Amino acid sequence: MGGIYLDHAATTFVLPEVREAMARHLEERVGNPSSIHEFGRRAKATLEDAREAVAALIGASPAELVFTSGGTEADNAALIGAVLALRDRGRHVVTTAIEHHAVLHTARQLQDWGFDVTYVHPGPQGVVKAEDVAGAIRPDTVLVSVMWVNNETGAVQPVREIGALVKERGLLFHTDAVQAVPWLPVEVDDIGCDLLSVSAHKLHGPQGIGALFVRKGTPWVPLLYGGAQERGRRAGTENVPGIVGFGAAAAWIKGRRAAGLDHAERLRKIFLGTVREEFGQVLVHSPEDGIPAILNVAFPGVSAETLLMNLDLHGIAASSGSACTSGSLEPSHVLQAMGLEDAVVRSSLRFSFSIQTTEEEVREAGRAVGRIARRLVRPGGHG
């Protein structure tokens, strides 16, 4: 199938190495990893090998990793599990206004349950200040949750500084690292987090599998109950084929992140330069020091919704925001939190690259995007 895919922040394509690893596992006669017979033991050994690979990707001990159905479940489990474990100590949570909806909607649910949540807003570059996060902490705060890399703009949050400030106060710190892990060297001890979320399909693994790092000794209760899988922390038979794919993707990406960042930086420059040649001036919402693989751009005088549909007709895939909300017509909560005017928000699209995206693809896409956007400018809408 043809076309140019520039929506890798929504999901990445599964690597051939990952498909092959999953196929090999599925072709074997393996049992339930909780069974004590040989078939079960083989499945368990395969699962634990993959756990080691994923744990190594974030600098964690394998015993601290809980497999989930994806990043959304990991975020839910982190927030709900932490506040329920500590509800007798306090009922206040600090997070940001630019989190993925997996965190924001969970936070709103916590509010419905009687917890209090403070939402810290970012500056105009989409980055929150560590001192603002610290300033939101109260005597009854039990958890701080701040994403590492924003999924709509690529802005990198000061999680190391925030982690240090949170630890000084003896509180739990969670970070959604779903968009960070594919690009940055992640070490859980380096940022001092107690809980960290990661997802396989953002780093060329399969969809439907993720993980939550839970530091040993962290007050936390499971989200699901039933069997004793995942050391009693996540009931239900494990998705072993998905976990195998996750492990293969983690092993593949681990040594390629630095080169991937350099590649993404080149792609960003080529794409932006080509778009500007064809369209003229655009507004770039993604900071220069962010992850270059995520590029959020406004086309003055152009409806993002109309542009998105026209790009699709021309075989170019982009996004108007998070994949979990782009099916709706709601404006981006991230761009709104950055203080952008509604007209600018509604003219903005996200283009996102992967390590597999080619320079030829972004050059061709940039020309097409610029030309199509130019054609769609409303009268008097483009200076």
Image (tube, helix red, strand yellow):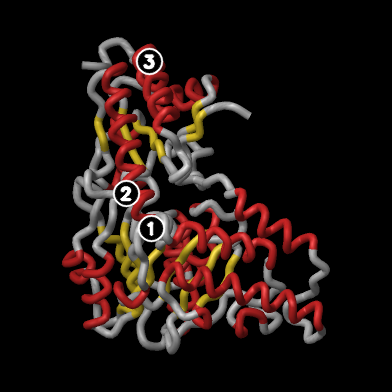
Q: Is residue 270 left or right of residue 202?
A: left
Instruction: Give the mark nearer the N terminus: 3 vs 2.
Output: 2
Q: In which image quadrant can residue 258 be found? A: bottom left
| Mark 3 residue type | Arg
Q: Are marks 1 and 3 in contact (CB under 8 Å)?
A: no
State yes or no: discs 2 and 1 in contact (Cβ < 8 Å): yes
Q: CA distance from mark 1 to mark 3?
A: 32 Å
Q: Is tag 2's residue or tag 1's residue first in the polypeptide sequence?
A: 1
**x and y percent of residue 378 in the render?**
33, 14
- Residue 10 is situated, as x and y percent measured from the top left of the image, at 49, 45
From the image, tell me which residue sits under label 1: 180
For mark 3, give the secondary structure.
helix
Q: Determine whether 89 is above or below 107 in the image.
A: below
Q: Amino acid at mark 2?
A: Ile
Q: CA distance from mark 3 to mark 2?
A: 26 Å
- Residue 12 seen from this side: yes
**Circle 2 crowding by C-alpha within 10 Å: few under 14, some 14–19, many from 20:** many
**Which quadrant would the C terminus be assigned to in this image?**
top left
Residue 95 in the image, given as x and y percentages of width and height: 33, 64
Which mark identifies residue 371? Answer: 3
- Does residue 180 appear left or right of residue 166 in this picture? right
Quadrant in the picture for the N terminus? top right
Kindly identify the residue that appears in the image at 30 percent across and 10 percent down: 379
What mark, if any, has residue 291 been given in the picture? 2
Residue type (three-letter) at the residue carrying disc 1: Ala
Residues at badges 3 and 2 in contact (C-beta under 8 Å)? no
Instruction: Give the CA separation, mark 2 to mark 1.
Output: 8 Å
292 is higher (above) or lower (below) than 55: above
- Mark 1 falls on what kind of element? loop
Residue at image position (66%, 77%) is: 235
Instruction: Kindly identify the residue that appears in the image at 69 percent across and 78 percent down.
Output: 44
